[in-house]
Image (spheres, helix red, strand yellow):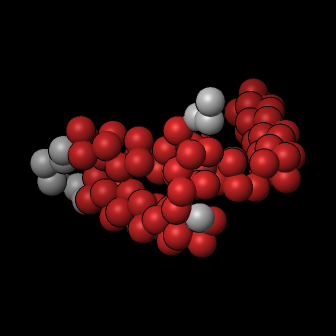
Amino acid sequence: MMDIYTEAVKKYGKEHQLIVTFGELSECAAEIAKHMIPDRVHDEQELINELADVCIMMEQMHVIYGEALSKAIHIKSKKLRKHIEEDKYEQEQ
């Protein structure tokens, strides 16, 4: 049995899901921007909902790009680890 993400990519196709991903990322970015405005009431649940939509689309991007995406994430995570360690070192001085 296919998982829901594989099923969505198979049903709607790569190009369509890339377009949907673009839209979800844009909506999430707009919601994050709202949360950056000082002295404004923020709907935390709305941000959580947009983040959930992005996570779902990212899972579909894993289906589409597979091992290449996993490899890129691994490399970027190692860079993040290095940045964290460098910042920690600088703070200890």
Percent x, y of residue 8: 52, 50
Compared across the picture, whether 47 is left or right of 83 comes to left
Of 71 and 64, nearer the camera is 64
Residue at the (69%, 47%) spot, across then down: 62
Percent x, y of residue 76: 79, 48
Percent x, y of residue 30: 33, 64
Percent x, y of residue 56: 49, 44
Of 74 and 35, nearer the camera is 74
Quarter of the image where the N terminus is located: top right
Compared across the picture, whether 90 is left or right of 51 comes to right
Q: Quadrant of residue 3?
A: top right
Compared across the picture, whether 36 is left or right of 58 comes to left
Asked if residue 59 is positioned above or below residue 92 in the image, the reply reads below
Kindly tell me whether residue 44 is visible in this rendering.
yes
Residue at the (24%, 38%) spot, across then down: 45
Residue at the (26%, 59%) spot, across then down: 34
